[in-house]
Amino acid sequence: MNLKIKFLSLVALATLSVSAQTNSIPFFIGTYTGEGSKGVYRSHLDTITGKLSSPEIAATVENPSYLAVSGDNRTLWTVSEMDKTYCLSAFAIDDAMNLKFINSQSGEGGSSCYISELVPGKWLGSASYGSGLVTFYPLNADGSIGTVSTIDKHWGRVTRAHSIVPDPNGKFIYSADLGIDKILVYTIHEGHLVPYTEANLPKGIGPRHIDFDASGRWMAVANELASSVIILQRDMNQAFTTVVSQTSMLPPDFKERSSAADIHFSPDGKFLYASNRGHNSIVVFAFDNATGTLTRLGWATQGINRPRNFAIDPTGKFLLVANQDGNDIVVFKRNQQTGMLTPLNERITVSRPVCLKFIHIKH
């Protein structure tokens, strides 16, 4: 596949030092292109007021439906979601948050929808929903992507690999498969991704996205088909395979069609948030770190329209929602004591936004 990627030269912003004292935090926006969007955009969040800067095109790339920012803030990786093939691309990030194309790697894998840095500076992974496979690539010192090391086809009748994430302790890699209702667990051995074990989830729930609490003791899974959250804990080998609880993301009286999408713990691990498409909301849970149980606190709904993805800013003060069908990004103020969300009536227009990734704050 020949994917044309054009780096757009932009007028540099004032040099930005991203630190805990910075009141303006940059973030990147992944989109579906072809209906007004050209690729990856950038904006800044004012962590005092919650205001967003006008979005600017950072790089043109086809359907960058998921993004990953390296731990050192030097590189942005994108996965281009297409029907039968995929393309992973690397961009250098300068101090003004400009992107400069480095390289790309392509392959066969339909509807690739997730990308993450699995080992800092060493390994990159992606997941292909349409083909039910995960891919594993080495990273070079400049952030460029090396030749594929492993392509693993998920085992099962109808596989739908929807995410791939590293364990906080660095030992395992996890991939949620919506088609077979499993979390597949891998290790890295001699430069390859190797199947290790699996977590069996209730049939028909459709696991999609994964997050871990601040302590690293608990895994949360958003289940697309069941609109629920499952909490898992570690087994005797320290892999997350043991189901502790399952909690609905929807109000008890809501009977219309809805599907779960994204999920994130608050930075302090006391609250958990997940997005509903159909109910069009962000559900707020209190999380009990001692027992791994969730308590529904409420739903934020104002200005939300098919929330494919959302992000909590690194300070924990704000939650941003990417409205795929609303063609905008809206901001909620997050009460760090109660976990509840208050709409700020702050929005920026971006065509079909589907992924938000903040730059990491340096403390």
Image: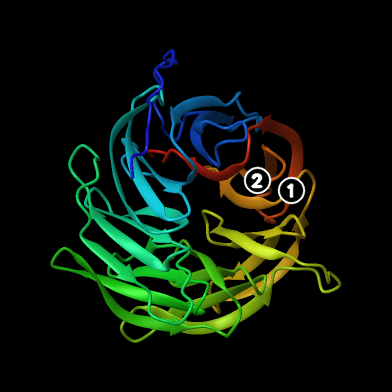
Could you tell me if the residues under marks 1 and 2 are in contact, i.e. CB atoms within 8 Å? yes
Query: What's under tag 2, amino acid-wise?
Result: Gln
Q: Nearer the viewer, residue 336 or 160?
A: 160
Judged left or right of residue 18, residue 295 is right
Q: Is residue 4 visible?
A: yes
Quadrant where the C terminus sits is top left
Disc 1 element: loop
Q: Which quadrant would residue 281 be assigned to in this image?
A: bottom right
Judged left or right of residue 172, residue 59 is right
Query: What's under tag 1, amino acid-wise?
Result: Asn
Q: Nearer the viewer, residue 37 or 316?
A: 37
Which residue corresponds to mark 1? 305
Is 171 situated above or below 359?
A: below
* Residue 186 picture location, percent across and down: 30, 73
First along the sequence among labels 1 and 2 = 1
Instruction: Name the residue located 43 percent from the left edge and 72 percent from the top edge.
Output: 217
Which residue corresponds to mark 2? 324
Instruction: Name the residue located 53 percent from the left edge and 66 percent from the top edge.
Output: 208
Quadrant where the N terminus sits is top left
